[in-house]
Amino acid sequence: MNNNYLKLAIQKEGRLTQETLSFLKKSGLEFESYNQRLYSSCRNFPLEIIYVRVSDIPDYVSSGSVDLGIIGQNILCEERPKVKKLLNLRFGFCSLILAIPKESTIKNLSDLRDQKIATSYPNSTANFFKKNSISIKIVNISGSVEITPTLGVSQAVVDLTSSGSTLELNDLKVLAKIYDSEAVLITNDQTLKSAKKKILGKLLTRFKGVLSARDYKYVMMNAPKNIIPRLKKITPGLKSPTLAPLAKDGWYSVQTVIKEDIFWETIEKLKKLGASGILVLPIEKIIT
């Protein structure tokens, strides 16, 4: 391993693994990865990727054994490791929820007073109920917690869920959401103060380019000259739309970007204005 390279720890096998590898490759990093590999060196960037258990990543980062890590926000909330969060990576979405059996007589949080809650997240669970001034008994479970109400071990569970399918299979329903989680990039003070800071800046530029691209669509259209001032207000792009005159007199080709969250609303406005031949393309990266 090269000590001058950034070292990034990622989950070897689990919920975040494939999306993490996909994100890194979308960032233009070239490396080999397969199940038995312990680490990879990037061919086109001074970065080494270390494959470990996700539970070990905070310790590796906080101790300075590695410079960076990708973990779920839920681990930061639960363990409070001494690390710095650099970026939300916009994948690995899930929620920590409080769930009860569908046939339970429990209707609200206060009904759980002095009851048993099974969870793999004892700190998050304790903090949640403390904020709500409700005393409970936590049953710390390292494996699947969904079965515990059926076994009579607990009256409710606190666990991560993404699709809710596991809850449904175990006849559970959500009583409350404790927090949302997604994949995050973490680092430590040593790296931020080291000679590797410049390399880290370049890596963050790549990551932010991929993240920014997810928020926008690239749009090309034809528009008559008289609607251009109003069109500019609707689709400002990153700075301003790009205009080019067409062979047809009084018409322009317009190129711009539209934010994903207002995309369809904006397209309807453009059509009403008189824009035509609207072509929508995905964006791979945006570097600002």
Image (tube, helix red, strand yellow):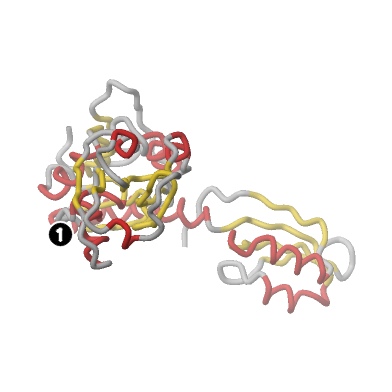
Considering the numbered disc 1 on the image, is that residue within a helix, a strand or a loop?
helix
Tell which residue pokes out farthest to the top in this image. 36
Q: On the rendered structure, is 265 left or right of 60?
A: right
Please tell me in which quadrant of the rendered image residue 26 appears.
top left
Residue drawn at (69%, 65%) of the image: 265
The answer to whether residue 206 shows anywhere in this view is no
Please tell me in which quadrant of the rendered image residue 19 appears.
top left
Tell which residue pokes out farthest to the left in this image. 63
Q: Nearer the viewer, residue 158 or 256?
A: 158
Residue drawn at (57%, 51%) of the image: 283
Residue drawn at (42%, 42%) of the image: 172
Q: How many badges with numbers are in the image?
A: 1
The answer to whether residue 114 shows anywhere in this view is yes
- Determine whether 14 is above or below 74 in the image: above
Q: On the rendered structure, is 287 left or right of 155?
A: right
Quadrant containing the N terminus in the rendered view: top left
Q: Amino acid at mark 1?
A: Lys
Residue bearing the label numbered 1 = 193
Q: Nearer the viewer, residue 109 or 188?
A: 109
- Badge 1, how many Cα within 10 Å: few under 14, some, many 20+? few
Residue 57, how many percent across, how many down? Answer: 20, 42
Q: Nearer the viewer, residue 137 or 286?
A: 137
Residue 131, how many percent across, how many down? Answer: 25, 67
- Determine whether 241 is above or below 146 in the image: below
Residue 40, how many percent across, how many down? Answer: 28, 30
Q: On the rendered structure, is 210 left or right of 54?
A: right
Residue 35, how many percent across, how many down? Answer: 32, 23
Tell which residue pokes out farthest to the front in this image. 105
Q: On the rendered structure, is 226 left or right of 66?
A: right
- Determine whether 216 is above or below 138 in the image: below
